[in-house]
Image (cartoon, grey):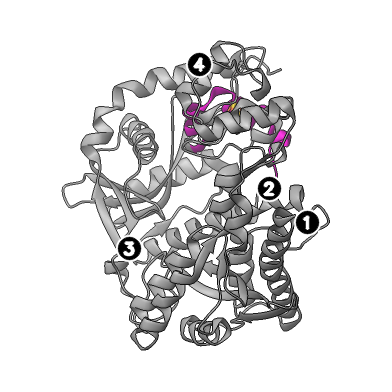
Amino acid sequence: MSSNKAPMLSKSRYLSGLQCHLRLWNSCFNRELASEVTPAQQALFGTGQEVGELATRLFPEGVLIREDHFHHEEAVQTTRNIVQDPSVSTIFEAAFLYHDVRIRVDILKRLDNGQWNMIEVKSSTSVKDIHLPDVAIQYYVLKASGLNINRAFLLLINNQYVYDGSNFDLENFFSFYDVTDEVLSIQNEIPSSIDEQHQMLSAADAPLVQPSRHCNTPFICEFWEYCTKDMPAHWIFDLYGVSQKKFDELTGMNVEDIKDIPDAFNLTELQERMRKCVKNNETFISKRLHAQLTDVEYPVHFLDFETVNPAIPRYAHTSPYQVIPFQWSDHILYEDGSLAHKEYLCDDDRDPRDDFTRTLLHALGQKGTIFIYTTYEKTIIERLAEYLPQYRDDLLRIPNRFKDLCAIIRHYFYHPGFHGSFSLKFVLPVLVPEMRYDTLSIKDGSHASFEYLRMIHPDTVSEEKEKIKEDLLVYCSQDTLAMVRIREQLMK
Ligand code: SF4
């Protein structure tokens, strides 16, 4: 329950409210219901901060409004004073308040004619739908605060930029996008959206909103786990690839549980298979599964890569967000049933691609089927082949030996415990319950990337580096051993 006085909105609260009123309500009154921030989200946040700081270097004369968001009124007053001072040409984090909405503007640039350009910095490489209301709410508050705005810009990352390894060219790393017209076209929607949000927040009770596809777009809602905790174990949301239309149709028919979907309801082949398995509590095993798994050439490899894709390129000849593989693991099964393991992990801050490739080619040799899980490894190999012409031919022969274990499972096997996901993290606990990810220090690929960047950071002490290294080796090796065991189980 809330009091009758609605809390202030901020830009992020306003955007939460546009996505879902319940999300905004919970952000204001029930923060404790939010799930813990994941390492991937932490990394994203860190990237946003790093890129934001880098952007300020484009305006070396800029003045920062230092008061934090706990001191918004003071920040507004400081901003007001600085706006009056014509010697200041650029302001960072300028603070404004209007219609009970608080905003901080990344960059305000004073023009010679007394007008201002507002600039919102994002770590994206293209303009996204969500950027427009983000800039629009700022534009609205700035205008209403009496600032004479000329244009509104997004400052994004230029993914065509290639770092030469020595001089970081800020001008080329960033790109300006003028979004003034788009932002102006939605100005008239803003006052009513703000009023709706204020009204909703002044109500006695939380709004009633059912979790649905909107919970992941444009942001993954932090209250997802809480909102879905009472859903059936086989909720219709888990139907593989379910569209919003189908989801709404089923919800409209009061169907929440996959087992209650009527026989006549139009589903894809895979969704229909899921429905049957859940309804009859049975496992689907295609007659073709065994042949798919056993049609192999020895030695059989089980291969997995770990990668990073830093927004700010670290190594020569790389671009923003370019995917850099830093680790591989290969379990090798010989015809006599013996199993060997080979691995590589770059453990210092240098471009790992050459060593990664050389060691990988040596481990994989010239023959033998290679099981992968999804086609990610194929994409990485193709990119390495472009970058390392000396290995090109050898690299491009590798995907001919690939067999995608995930695709085999998706086509020829289903267990209700998968809950509509074929990711290793869902498949493994069902097929090989003694192997778990939740007991590992590193639990998924994005966590591995995050930890890798921490390991190679110059400020990380050597003890911590060693610990991360060990965790990374354990994690990647688990991925490939998991494939070995899953195949064994499926062959039974
Ligand atoms: S999980 Fe969905 S319904 Fe619940 S608060 Fe978030 S967006 Fe709203």
Does label 4 or label 3 sit earlier along the sequence? 3
Q: Quadrant of residue 278?
A: top right
- Sort mark 4 into few (<14), some (14-19) or many (20+) by Cα contacts within 10 Å: few
Looking at the picture, does residue 206 appear above or below residue 487? above
Secondary element type, mark 4: helix
Q: Which disc is residue 426 wearing?
A: 2
Q: Quadrant of residue 229?
A: top right
Mark 2 to mark 4 CA distance (whole Å): 27 Å
Rendering coords of residue 261 (x, y %): 61, 18
Highlighted range, magenta: 12-36
Q: Amino acid at mark 2?
A: Phe
- Taking the image as shown, residue 210 lies to the left or right of residue 181, namely right
Foreground: 199 or 236? 236
- Sort mark 2 into few (<14), some (14-19) or many (20+) by Cα contacts within 10 Å: some
Kindly report which numbered mark, 2 or 3, lies closer to the viewer in this rendering. Answer: 2
Does label 2 or label 3 sit earlier along the sequence? 3
Regarding ligand 1, which quadrant of the image does it lie in?
top right
Mark 4 to mark 1 CA distance (whole Å): 36 Å
Q: Is mark 2 within 8 Å of ligand 1?
A: no
Residue 232 in sight here: no
